[in-house]
Amino acid sequence: MTREPESNLATRFAPYLSYPADGAGPSACPVRDVLDRLGEKWTTLIVMNLSEGPRRFSALHRSVPDISKRMLTQTLRLLERDGIAARTVFPTKPPSVEYSLTPLGQSLLEPIAQLVAWAEDSHDRIRAARQDFDQTLT
Amino acid sequence: MTREPESNLATRFAPYLSYPADGAGPSACPVRDVLDRLGEKWTTLIVMNLSEGPRRFSALHRSVPDISKRMLTQTLRLLERDGIAARTVFPTKPPSVEYSLTPLGQSLLEPIAQLVAWAEDSHDRIRAARQDFDQTLT
DNA sequence: ATCGTATGGTCTACGTAAGAGACCATATCC
DNA sequence: GGATATGGTCTCTTACGTAGACCATACGAT
C-alpha cells in the first residue's frame, strides 16, 4: 500500500517542486518567477491599494506609511515592468503621477482575494498555534 | 460622478489597506501578519512540497537544492509554529524527522493553487511586458 | 518677499536578513 | 577504517530594506 497524496492538488504543484529558480531567460521556473515577485513584501499590499482605482504616488505613501519612498518606487517600477500596473504622468506643475492596475493586474485581484479570505479565516487558529508553540518551548 | 472602483473585490481589501503591520499582539493587521509569512520566499515552495505527503528534512533539501539548510530549518520552524506543518521525530539511529501538513496547512493548498494557476496563465504576458519595458528603457 | 507645503522621486548611510559552507555525534555499509 | 547518511547549528559574507536628507519647482498664506 503506497502513500496516498494529501490532496489531488498536489499534482498541480508537481512540475514546480524541484524547478530551479535561476537560469536566465526561459530556464527559470515560471511559477517561482511570478510567485517570488508577489512575495516581495510590499507587492500585494500596493496591488490591493490600487484595486480601488488609480492612485497617486503620495496618496499611496500616505495610505501605507510604513513603506519607505525608496521601496515604494521600486515596488511600483517592478509592477510596471511586469505589466501589472501602469504609470501615467500628468504635465502639471509640479508633475503628478498616477498609478493604476492594468487588466492583467486586475486579474490578479481574484487570487489575492482568496488568500486574504484564507488569512481572515485562519488568523485565529494561527495565533493560537503560535502561542502553544511558544509556551511549550518556554 | 465619482470614481468607480475597478472591481467589487476592492471592498474586500479596504479594511487592510492602511492597517499597520507592527504592534505586538492583536494590534497587528491579521492579513498582513499572515501574508507576510507566506511571502517569505521559501514558504509556499515548502508547503507545495509537503502537499504530496510527509517528507523528511533531507528529502526536502534534495527536492529544493537551492535553499540553504539554515533557511530550510527556519522555514519549517515557522510553519510548525503557525500550525501549518507538523514535525515528528522517529527514534531511529540517527533520528529521522518527518514533516507533514496539518489540516490547516492543507486548507492553504487551495488558495496557493489559485495563485499557481494565475502564474501559469500570466507568465507569458508578464515576460512579454518585461521585455517591452526593458527595451523601451534602453 | 518669504516661509511652509506639495509634487515625485533619488542618494547615501546604516542595520538586518539571507546565502554558503564548515562542523557535530552517531551508526551503518563496504 | 573510511565513506555516507541522519538533522541540524554556527560563523562569515553578501544582499536587501529602512530612515532620512536632498532636489527643482510652484502655490498659498503671512
Image (tube, coloured by chain):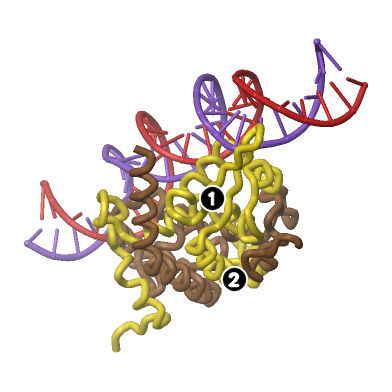
Chain colours: A yellow, B brown, C purple, D red
Residue at 60% over, 42% down: A90
* Residue that appears at 53% across and 52% down: A43
Q: Is residue A116 visible?
A: yes
| Residue B11 pos. (x, y %) | 69, 67
Return the residue nearer the eye: B108 or B119.
B119
Question: Which sits earlier in the primary sequence, circle 2 or circle 1?
Answer: 1
Query: Label 2 amino acid?
Result: Trp
Q: Residue drawn at (65%, 72%), measured in percent from left and top?
A: A121
On-image quarter of the C terminus of chain A: bottom right
SS for tag 1? loop
Q: Hey, what amino acid is under mark 1?
A: Lys
Query: Which of the two residues, A130 or B5, is positioned nearer the viewer here?
Result: B5
Q: Is residue A71 above or below residue D7?
A: above
Residue B49 vertical position relative to residue D14 in the rendered view, above or below:
below
Q: Residue at x 45, y 73 (%)?
A: B113
Crowding at dot 2, Cα within 10 Å, few <14 / some 14-19 / many 20+, comes out as some
**Residue A22 picture location, percent across and down:** 29, 51
Q: Residues within 10 Å of mark 1 (few under 14, many from 20)?
A: many
Labelled pair 2, 1 in contact (Cβ < 8 Å): no
- The image position of residue A3, as x and y in percent, is 33, 82
Q: Quadrant of the N terminus of chain A?
A: bottom left
Taking the image as shown, residue B89 lies to the left or right of residue C9, namely: left
Place residue A133 in its image quadrant.
bottom right
The residue that disc 2 covers is A118
Q: Which mark is residue A41?
A: 1
Q: Tell which subunit mark 1 falls on.
A: A
In the image, taking residue B115 as reference, residue B31 lies left or right, namely right
Of all chains, the one bearing label 2 is A
